[in-house]
Image (cartoon, rainbow, N blue to C red):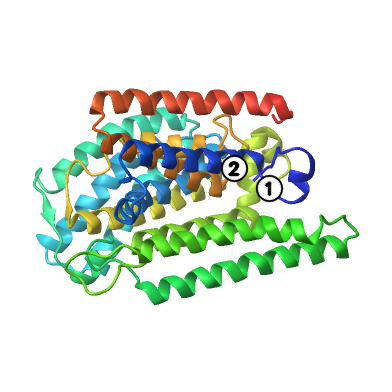
Amino acid sequence: MSNPTPGWWRRTGVDLRLLLMSVLLIAMGVVFNVMSGGVFLSPENLYNVAQQTAVVGIVSTVMVLVIVARHIDLSVGSVMGFVGVLIAYLQYTSGWSWPAACLAGLAVALLVSIYQGWLTAMLGVPSFVVTLGGLMSFRGAAFLVADGKTQPVNDEFFQRLGGGYDGGIGTNATWILAGFVALVLFARMLQKRRARAHHEMPNEPLWLELLLTAVPAAVVFVFAAVMNNYQIASKDAPQGLPIPVLIWAVVAIVLSFIVHRTRFGRYVFAMGGNPDAAALVGIPVKRVTLMLFALLAVLVTVAAIVSIARLNAGTNSLGTGMELYVIAAAVIGGTALAGGTGSIFGSVLGALIMQSLDSGMLLLDVPIGKRMVIIGQVLIVAVVFDVLYRKRFGEN
């Protein structure tokens, strides 16, 4: 939410940190593409990377708010596995419809998160300890639900939610959506200029703001073109935008709206900035904490649905290790582990960087041990960069 960027960058609303991350992501893509002989930036691989990133990206958006509020959840991967296996079990073994199974999974996820949130908010137990126990407990619960057996899902509509063979929205819908996003970006830019003029605040030159808006609009069209250029051999038409990516985008937009336009979002950042002061000015810290954990439950359920729909099955290993990727995506995206500062769009870039790094190393046949070492060190480097960046620009 906060923007430590100096100079005219701040006035135009551009976050220098996010710009640097975008450059890093592009550089990674170019390097991996050269080293893989042109495979990494192929439409097929980029389509797969986008789909694979969606699950981590969905959860990382809300993990930003959890960390901003000076909490953390180490159990998100285990809870996702538990809820995912339960949803698949209810569909396959118990014969439930997929909407009923998903609602049951959501109810269980809410119970789990409110239980953990209650221990944290009401009893003052550190969320690190509570969710560390949850990491083990709910991984075990995933095994208990289906007695360790994989639970396939067969509903065709449900499977589309995970992408795959029929999981794209088509080329026409993709182009229309890209055009709509571009229009929104330019309309938002003009609205900000009018608002600044109305309040007698200085505006940057129009050509500069048009350029700064045209760049992300162009990125949207390039992404749409890449998605529309991928076609499965046995199909007559390209896939278009994958449904999981569309879900991720909607989640990111909704969370961004909550952060910038609602009282709840302001409360979360106020709690992270100074919890004692937030309580003194009347912010219901305990209630907001419970609401935050409930929101986390909703998005963990969404991620579980997308994941089992993509795999066409609920497995006991679902979500294993995901907490590392989710927290890393938030931190790489500029969320301070000390709380008080974070960015939803930053988590999107962080998730893309993490998945691109993992996918690139996989294409280069880097052994899993080395991949884990590198990804772990990338997280440390991100934290070090965050500390140095805040010291340089004077942000607490």
Q: Is residue 355 above or below residue 180?
A: above
Q: Position of residue 289 (x, y in %)?
A: 53, 44
Is residue 324 rendered to the left or right of residue 369?
A: right
In the image, what residue occupies the spot 39% across and 32% down? 130
Mark 2: amino acid? Leu
**Depth check, front residue: 256 or 19:** 19
In the image, what residue occupies the spot 81% across and 66% down? 194
> For the C terminus, which image quadrant?
top right
Is residue 94 rendered to the left or right of residue 59?
A: left
Res 284 visible: no
Mark 2 and mark 1 in contact? Answer it, CB < 8 Å. Answer: yes
Res 296 visible: yes
Is residue 265 rendered to the left or right of residue 173?
A: right
Q: Which residue is mark 1?
A: 14
**Depth check, front residue: 361 or 369:** 361
Mark 1: amino acid? Val
Q: Position of residue 300 (x, y in %)?
A: 36, 50
Q: Which residue is mark 2?
A: 18
